[in-house]
Image (cartoon, grey):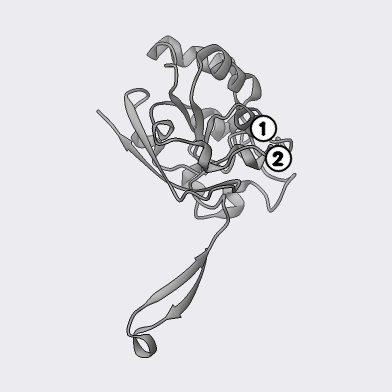
Amino acid sequence: MEFENVADFKDDGHFLRRFSMGEHSGTHLSAPSGFRQGAPGHEGFSPQDLVRPAVVIDIAAQSGANSDYALTMNDILDWESGHGPVPQGCLVLLRTGWQAKWGRPLNYLGGARAPQLHFPGFGLDAAQMLLEGRNIGGLGVDTAGVEPGADTGLSVSEYALGNRLIVLENMTNLDLLPPTGALLVVGLLRLDGGSGGPAAVTALVP
């Protein structure tokens, strides 16, 4: 983020700043318009779209052993064997443990630029299973992208946003959430027509 002072107490009697940041900086909600020309930006999401139950699938152990790990269909079935079916309309949050790397950008991204990035995420087959087989409402992850960093085609983002799913990236505190039972409220800096924008995500837990 960049800040510029535009008024100060000495000269203007009040304090005011201007700021600028990327639409995908920090925790953010992506928009279909980032992958489809003519698709909606944040204006395509209603307030009701942004209040949803959430489940958390924990792959921190797998990700610790393989920074390119992609969630599999078997991972989803294993999760369901302990917690029941993934609920329709929910947000599926993927806990990889990557939030611990946030203060070290090269470690967090696994490289300086594409195609050198290495971080875990959703596999395309798993994302398709969640949408087509479970009718979920969206995906969220504690890394810089919903697909692994090595997926330079951004296949899961392309698929999810092409189907108008919610896509949340750079999330934090997923380790504090239960596997089921949380309700997520997504607050937006709504940048109509853009490719996405910063989001403040609040989890209400039982």
- Residue holding disc 1: 158
Q: In the rendered image, which quarter is residue 155 located in? A: top right
Q: Position of residue 134 (x, y in %)?
A: 50, 14
Residues packed near mark 2 inside 10 Å, few (<14), some (14 to 19) or many (20 plus): few
Amino acid identity at mark 2: Gln
- Nearest to viewer (mark 2 / mark 1): 2
Determine the residue positioned at 43% across, 31% down.
49
Q: Residue furthest bottom?
A: 11
**Label 2 vs 1, first from the N-terminus:** 2
Q: Are marks 2 and 1 in contact (CB under 8 Å)?
A: no
- The one nearer the camera, 168 or 178, is 168
Q: In the rendered image, which quarter is residue 115 located in? A: top right
Q: Position of residue 132 (x, y in %)?
A: 58, 14
- Residue 37's disc is 2
Give the total of numbered labels: 2
Determine the residue positioned at 53% across, 37% down.
44
Q: Is residue 181 above or below residue 203?
A: above
- Residue 30's disc is none
Q: Is residue 100 above or below residue 63?
A: below
